[in-house]
Image: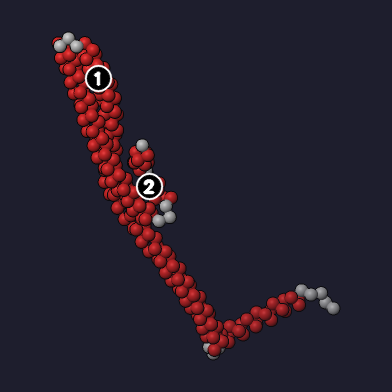
Amino acid sequence: MALLDRVSTLLRANLNDLVEKAEDPERMLKQVVLDMENQLMQVKTQVAIAIADQHLLEKKKAEHEQQAAEWRRKAELAVQKGQDDLARAALERALSQDQLQIGFTTQSEDQKHEADNLRQALHKLEQKLTETRAHCEMLIAEHRRARVIGRAAKAQHVVGNDQESTIGRMKSKVHVTAAENAAATEVLTPESLEDKFRALESQDKVELMLKEIKSRQPAQ
């Protein structure tokens, strides 16, 4: 049956795989539950129809069984009355009813098998629906939590980058300002007495080094 094939497909469905492939996992999960609920209602309807058909076939089987027994009783009565031709006709009717009874017995057994399959499918689908609802709720909550965490991480990353960029600009500005201040201090600060003596000493050293170089030169 196509219905049982659809039910079997739903029972084999792997929610985790579906979630990974879905563009909108929440919508997909809700649709899966809705599909299962719809299939469950259809299976319930089919189970009721199958059971009703089974009862009808069993009733027909019992009716033909009773009619076959009645024609046999009539055949016995005809034999008792010495009417063999009438007895033969009654027995033919009994055999015809036997064939109908056998046919309805086969149909009833087949219908019972189908009804049992539908009952099992209904039971499995009810269990699967209960599990799927719980699983879907868990996956939806997990998906929402992942989205919130993702947004928070993204926001933190953006804020962190902005902060680092701002701090970097401030550090650079501070370094430039410090250098400028140092240069201005060096230029504007008056030369001290110690600085003057160091300058004289430096000049003396330069003169001595110059004389030493000249002394090593050959006489002209």
Report whether residue 98 is seen: no
Amino acid bearing label 2: Asn
Residue plotted at (21% across, 11% down): 84
Q: How is the image coloured?
A: secondary structure
* Camera-side residue of 102 and 42: 102
Residue plotted at (15% across, 11% down): 81
Report whether residue 46 is seen: yes
Q: Which residue is mark 1?
A: 93
Q: Residue 16 got which mark?
A: 2
Q: Is residue 108 above or below residue 172?
A: above
Image position of 193 (left or right of 212): left
Amino acid bearing label 1: Arg
Q: Is residue 173 above or below residue 148?
A: below
Image position of 80 (left or right of 101): left
Residue plotted at (35% across, 43% down): 10
Residue plotted at (17% across, 9% down): 82
* Camera-side residue of 177 and 170: 170
How many numbered markers are drawn?
2
The quadrant the C terminus occupies is bottom right
Image position of 9 (left or right of 63): right
Crowd band around label 2 with a 10 angstrom C-alpha radius: few (<14), some (14–19), many (20+): some
Q: CA distance from mark 2 to mark 1?
A: 64 Å
* Camera-side residue of 190 and 25: 25
The quadrant the N terminus occupies is top left
Q: Residue 175's x, y, as percent?
A: 50, 77
